[in-house]
Image (tube, helix red, strand yellow):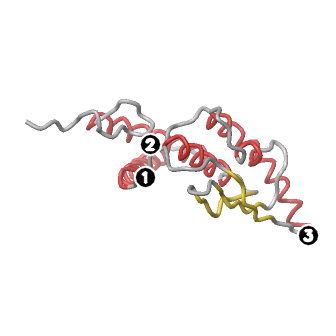
Amino acid sequence: MTTIMGPGTRRFFGVPGARGAAGALVELTLWTIAGTLFWLATASTISVVEVLIAALAALLGGILARAARRAMPFRARPRRVWLRWAATVPVAAMADMVRLAGWLGGSQPEDLRTASMPQGRGPRETGWRAGGIVSLSATPGSVVVGSDPEVGTVTVHTLVSGWPGLDESVLRPRDEG
């Protein structure tokens, strides 16, 4: 008799220890809740139809996200530092929007720079890079346009920067987190 679920079985990212159908159900439920809440947060009016459409779209997105995640050879260990970055992103996004208003009326300087991030393809290093790239690209003032895990660098296109210093926080590898 062969064992389907053994010690080498993949764990579901974000659902520690969840496996099989129960893990898939929990993961899809989390994706659906998060997607629905995000949709409704951006809706001008909320009605029953809007909630149903949001939930259906979020469920479809969750199914596709789960399929894509399982198809990729991506293993990342979640990092504590992601929480700090996630808390900083909304503030940085608002500050960047204000700075971009001035940027549009001014000389429009921009910067393409290469910065360091942890080198390697282990779950720890991949987790740092994944969270950092998402955080930097979530603000309107910057976007990561390239990443080289072998060398430990990322290329960031920046239009504006400054307080609260998200880019400085993300682009310096540390052992904490």
Identity of the residue drawn at 52% across and 37% down: 78
Query: In this orientation, which residue lies closer to the viewer: 111 or 104?
Result: 111
Looking at the image, the residue that sits furthest to the left is: 1
Gap in Å between the C-alphas at discs 3 and 2? Answer: 42 Å
Task: Give the residue furthest to the bottom.
Answer: 107
Q: Circle 1 sits in a helix, a strand or a loop, which is it?
A: helix
First in sequence, mark 3 or 1: give its number.
1
Could you tell me the amino acid type at mark 3? Ser
Residue topped by disc 1:
61
> Seen from this angle, which residue lies furthest right?
106
Proximity of marks 2 and 1: CB atoms separated by less than 8 Å: yes
SS assignment at label 2: helix
Going from N to C along the chain, the mark reached first, 3 or 2, is 2
Label 2: how many residues lie within 10 Å, few (<14), some (14-19) or many (20+)? many
Q: Position of residue 21 (x, y in %)?
A: 26, 37
Residue pointed to by mark 3: 107
Nearer to the camera, 90 or 174: 174
Residue at 76% of width from left, 42% of height from top? 91
Q: Quadrant of the N terminus?
A: top left
Estimate the x, y position of residue 104 in percent, counting from the top left: 85, 66
Q: Nearer the viewer, residue 147 or 55?
A: 147
Measured as percent of width and height from the top left, residue 40 is found at 55, 44
- The residue sitting at 38% across, 49% down in the picture is 66
How far apart, in angstroms, are the residues tagged by discs 2 and 1?
A: 8 Å
**Amino acid type of the residue that numbered disc 1 sits on in the rendered structure:** Gly
Name the side, left or right, on which 25 lies relative to 89: left
In the image, which disc is placed on residue 31? Answer: 2
Dividing the picture into quadrants, the one containing residue 115 is bottom right
Q: In the rendering, which numbered label is found on residue 116?
A: none
